[in-house]
Amino acid sequence: MSTDIVNVKTIGVLTSGGDSPGMNAAIRAVVRASAQNDVSVYGIKHGYYGLINDEFIKMDTHSVSNIIQRGGTILKSARSDEFYTESGRKKAAENLEKYGIDALIVIGGDGTFTGANKLSKEHNINVVGIPATIDNDIIGTDETIGYDSALNTALDAIDKIRDTADAHERMFLVEVMGRDTGFIALETSIASGAELALLPEELTNIKEVKRQLHEMLKQQRRSSLVVVAEGDETGGAVKLAEKIKDDFAQYDMRVCILGHIQRGGSPTARDRVLASRLGAAAVKVLKEGHSEVMVGVVNNALKITPLRVAISKKKEIDHRLIDLAKVLR
């Protein structure tokens, strides 16, 4: 983590990995904070693919007007197998030099940060990461950009499913995103009053799942909701339904997979503010001479975390919330 004073006059900014609501708010903050500091900005379209293939566009304050409320990313995102190679990263570095870019701000998750860290170490490029992923699995920040929006989108959908589950006395298995972490599944299950939540962080005992559901049905709870993270070891909601359907053949069981609906839509106020804070902070820490770091917010205060630490492990879920979910069933 370098802290040598760097005369940053031109910044590049890109979004990479899965899109998340609030990325546009972060881009806007980077561009406008840079303008306040007399720093030029190039937007790089299609993430690392565009970095290698010279998709650079000059940006100014007008470029980011009327985007703070939009989901997705105006800079787009794409995969780049070439960036995984040393020759690909060399091309990327040459393009940054071609445009006179002194530093690079990358908006994304751990895969994005891993690439940025390699680029910085191999070619001595100043980089700062802004955590944006609906999974909320990056350490060094209480929340990542997009998490709150995805959470509220999932909750809105589950509330609607609850209405029809109650009307028809059905059991619904609702699958939410979370391949490696269960943050969305856990918090939506608590907020929606779901009867059960299955998470990647906990071993799923099918016998225990059946026992709990039978117990609920004995209590005349004819409708029930089970929230399943896609990364749960059962294999998601469809596989879970296959494993328990014979025991509940007399009940109307349905599976609903929310999927990519959780990525889209207008970001919440909380995500817009978080993204704005982190975008401005990224410019600030670059001007102060920091590199190979990620900016985050912990206990409402800005925090800098080395990229090597941010990518070293996944954020742990709050087990107190798991205990609460069990109490409130």
Image (cartoon, rainbow, N blue to C red):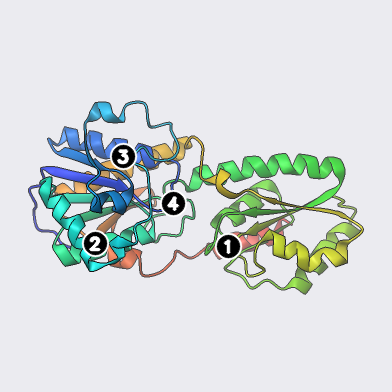
Label 2 or label 1, whichever comes before in sequence order: 2
The residue positioned 26% from the left and 26% from the top of the image is 62
The residue positioned 37% from the left and 43% from the top of the image is 76
Name the amino acid type tagged 2.
Gly
Q: What element carries label 2?
A: helix
Which corner quadrant of the image does residue 114 belong to? bottom left
Label 1 or label 3, whichever comes before in sequence order: 3
> Up-down: is 311 above or below 51?
below
Label 3 to label 2: alpha-carbon separation: 25 Å
Q: Is mark 3 on a helix, strand or loop?
A: helix
Q: How many labels does the image show?
A: 4
Q: Are marks 1 and 4 in contact (CB under 8 Å)?
A: no
In the rendered image, which quarter contains the N terminus? bottom left
Label 2 or label 4, whichever comes before in sequence order: 4
Q: Which label is found at residue 27?
A: 3
Label 1 or label 4, whichever comes before in sequence order: 4
In the rendered image, which quarter contains the C terminus? bottom right
Name the amino acid type tagged 4.
Gly
Label 2 to label 4: alpha-carbon separation: 21 Å
Q: Which label is found at residue 320?
A: 1
Q: Please state which of residues 158 and 56 is positioned toward the viewer in this rendering.
A: 56
Q: Which label is found at residue 88?
A: 2
Side of 188 relative to 133 (left or right): right
Pointer 4 residue: 18
